[in-house]
Image: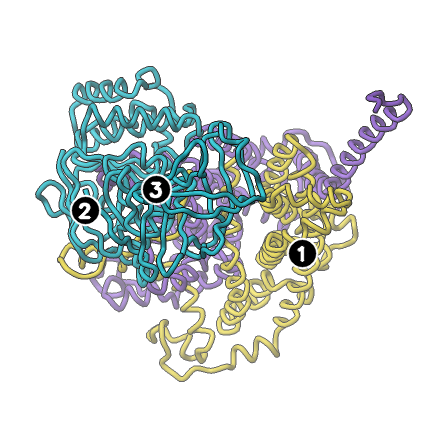
Amino acid sequence: MAKLTVRDLHTHFGSVRAVDGVSIDVRDGEFLVLLGASGSGKTTLMRTIAGLEKATSGEVVIGDRVVNGLPPNDRNIAMVFQSYALYPHKSVYRNIAFPLEAVRTDRAKIRERVEWAANLFGIGHLLDRKPRMLSGGERQRVALARALVREPNLFLLDEPLSNLDAKLRHQARHELKKLHGRIGITTIYVTHDQVEAMGLGERVAVMNFGRIEQIGKPSDIYREPANTFVARFMGSPAMNLLLKDGEVIGFHPENFLPVGESFQPGPDAMRLRFLVSGLEDLGADLLLYGQVPGADTSPMGEATEVIAKLPARLAGELEVGREHEFFVRERFVKRFDAATGKRVGAPAAA
Amino acid sequence: MSAHVPVAARRPAARDERAYARRESLLAIGMLAPAVLFIVLLVGVPFGLAIYYSLHDVTTGGTEVRWVGLRHFGELLRDRVFLRSLGNTVLFTVSTLVTVLVLGTVLAELLMRDFRGKWVVRFLILLPWTAPVALGLIGWLWMLDSVFSPIDWLLREVGLLGSRGAPLGALPNLYWLGDPVLAKVSIVLVNVWRILPLATVIVLAGLNSIPRDVIEQTRVDRAGYFRRLFDITLPMLSPILLVAILFTFVFTFSDMIAIFILTRGGPANMTQTLASHAFFTGILGGNLGRGAAIALFLLPVLAGVSAVLLRLIRRSEVT
Amino acid sequence: MTTSTATLPPAPARGRGVGRVASRTVFYLTVAIFTLFAALPFYVMLITAFKRNPNIFDPVASPFWYSQSPTFDHVRLLFTDTLFVRWLLNSFMVGGLVVLITLLLAVPAAYSLARLAGSWGEVLGIGIFLTYLVPPTLLFLPFAKVISTLGLQNSIWALVIAYPTFTVPFCTWLMMGFFKGIPKDIEEQAMVDGYTRLGAFFRAVLPLAVPGILTIVVFAFTLSTSEFVYALTFVQDSAQKTVSIGVPTELVRGDVFRWGPLLAGALIASVPVAVLYTFFIDHFVAGLTAVAGE
């Protein structure tokens, strides 16, 4: 186990700046999520840390060793690919044993470690099977077992849950979190799914164009986005952004509430007219789509409608096609600079 | 609204369905038939005829066809030239196979990398296979000529040949196509030269089909070059290697072109193979029955080895 | 499983370290040796085709370069004094006709096997492909009898009949692969839009199969022009020969080799075929390795 430090890392492919100046300090045993859309540089960053891509400039330090010039096999890292990269002609046992065989561990030790890793993931009964006879979830666990069977300093995961059934994903996410709690290896986890990131990470780094837009605890990133990109990236539905009086204001749909019996605005609340044009009853929640007259929705890019998210019990109170009075409590209003998109007046970072 | 569908309306629907299915089958057969018919007629008939001839006394000139049963086969098995042809066929095929596999895998690994001028190199390396067989071999006829061979010239220039005390002899030329041993070496050499590009490209396709993830995983898992090669690459490559073996075998085992152009089976029938012997006996010698019998010996081995290889290929599929 | 051939690892890395320089040298040296082995005969053919006769038949002179100035005489002789041009035309005609026959037979058969035959399709497809493996040296003798019975001996028509016996099996197999690569949705959409299955085949599928058709055209052509055994067996008349047998057999008078024109002819007839084949060889290999993928 070791801490990881990345200093001003650049990885360029010709003119493409896949990683464009990234610096992070990962604590020993921390679970860090790299979150971003495809092309944001998150996978390239991870591969550079692993040594599968050569850094153009900057440093990668694992523990207290600068590992830039070292190939992957000298960095004592473990990696799980999105495809799991199991060796198709080998049994589960041989797959898990492979990293130990590669460094000439003796047979008895191998058996001990393989059985330990297999039991950790509950696949001890599958040791004789070949990968093509396993389900997606089982294959994933074999890949994880193989990664942990020696004691790596660093554990890298590239979208390991994206090949699983949606229903399995919750379960797998929870198990991963428990696993990390037990083993405590420094982990870097790459994903494009922000729900996953929020659920898993101690800290989340949101990436865009090879740079880190914001890094911090999931709840902090959600509630206090550092710029309009992060504001629009997190949340489903994402934060509403409006251009009003030369300033960009943002508020989450769940904080956009109707003035009425259920909710009372305080004296410092921002009041807005809301012309409701559509309504979705999702069972537990109600989503209202509409326009705020007099406000420009251009900061939201292609989205042109403001969204409000209310408890479903209010379904009867609001009519589509009518203008209602809505409000947002002042502390839930986030302000951004109209030109740069950067957050104005944020509290000190955690 | 009534949910009851009148009987009269129901029946035509079922009939339409059957008619549609029948039309599709007719179409399937109609599109397939010409090709199948062509192959059955023009491959099947000669094939049957080959068996028929081998059991009869037939000549190209005469019109008489006499039943002789297995006489041809009996005579052949006592004929020295035939036995030598059989031995040569096995020798040439196995030597070519082993050499091509080793060299082909090495060359394929080299061609996996990217380097400047790669497409030129690829074109040149493929030439022996892509150029028409006979025409490429003409080049070798010159290269191995008993007076003007460029290879001999080179050997003379570096002193390995042509002077007293030279390691390869004092004569100015090696008789590549005239000396019994050298002639066999030449045939194998030329076969390897011709098949190597094909084997290489097949192995290359196999190497490219190994997912990059798996290779990178071996690097992360700390596997060295040889472990990666023998423990991961070759096993995953085995179906493709078997395909390369299959085609190398098929194209070499029944080939007579190299022998026809370079040695005519000589010197003194020392380089005859089953295919070339069949040709010289049947066409140039006129003895169709005997020639067909010789050629038929190709069949069991070809069919047997192909069947075994195909079975192995199916079984070694890993994904 | 993800496969990627996008970025190949570079040749051993540039710069620093004796180890790197050494492995780079070994790499390029090995590549050079293989290239030389493959291409040397052709290089020598190229040089010699333009050498003056005294230069050619001088055992002391270098075979790899000129000692006297080069000459076009052999090439001129090839084109004016031999039937070379005739042979080229014959090869071309045979090739063209074989391509036509192959297209007419193989394309519908391949479609039928890929789409309409269900599970039979696979088995039949492999069966048809296996006839490609039946060597001409097995069949050529009785085939010769069939040809003479049909009265086609000594003419290029014998070859036009014989060649499809190996082009059709191989091209059907290749084309099957191509058809399978076209999504079924396209045809189903066409049928929903009102076409019959056959109509959908012509209107929707064939236009998308053009790369495949192009590939089998090239293969039928190159396989025909390279063929030797049948041509040697069926055609004796000099003027009816294809270039594949004409050059090796006609440019030798008894024991005298007219090396200049011989090598020139071999080279001139080889290069276009080789270039064409090289462009399409990846498809050829894909067809062969598909046997393993079933």
Residue C227 visible somewhere in the drawing: no
Q: Residue C99: which disc?
A: 1
Chain with yellow colouring: C
- Residues A226 and A187: in front is A226
Residue C176 occupies quadrant: top right
Amino acid type of the residue that numbered disc 2 sits on in the rendered structure:
Ala
Q: Secondary structure at mark 2?
A: loop
- Residues A268 and B181: in front is A268
Both labels 3 and 2 in a single chain: yes
Tint applied to chain B in the drawing: purple
Q: How far separated are the C-alphas under marks 1 and 2?
A: 76 Å
Circle 2 packing at 10 Å, graded few (<14), some (14-19), many (20+), is: few
Query: With respect to residue A168, does C233 lie above or below?
Result: below
Q: Chain of mark 1?
A: C
Q: Secondary structure at mark 3?
A: loop
Chain with cyan colouring: A
In the rendered image, the quadrant that contains the N terminus of chain B is top right
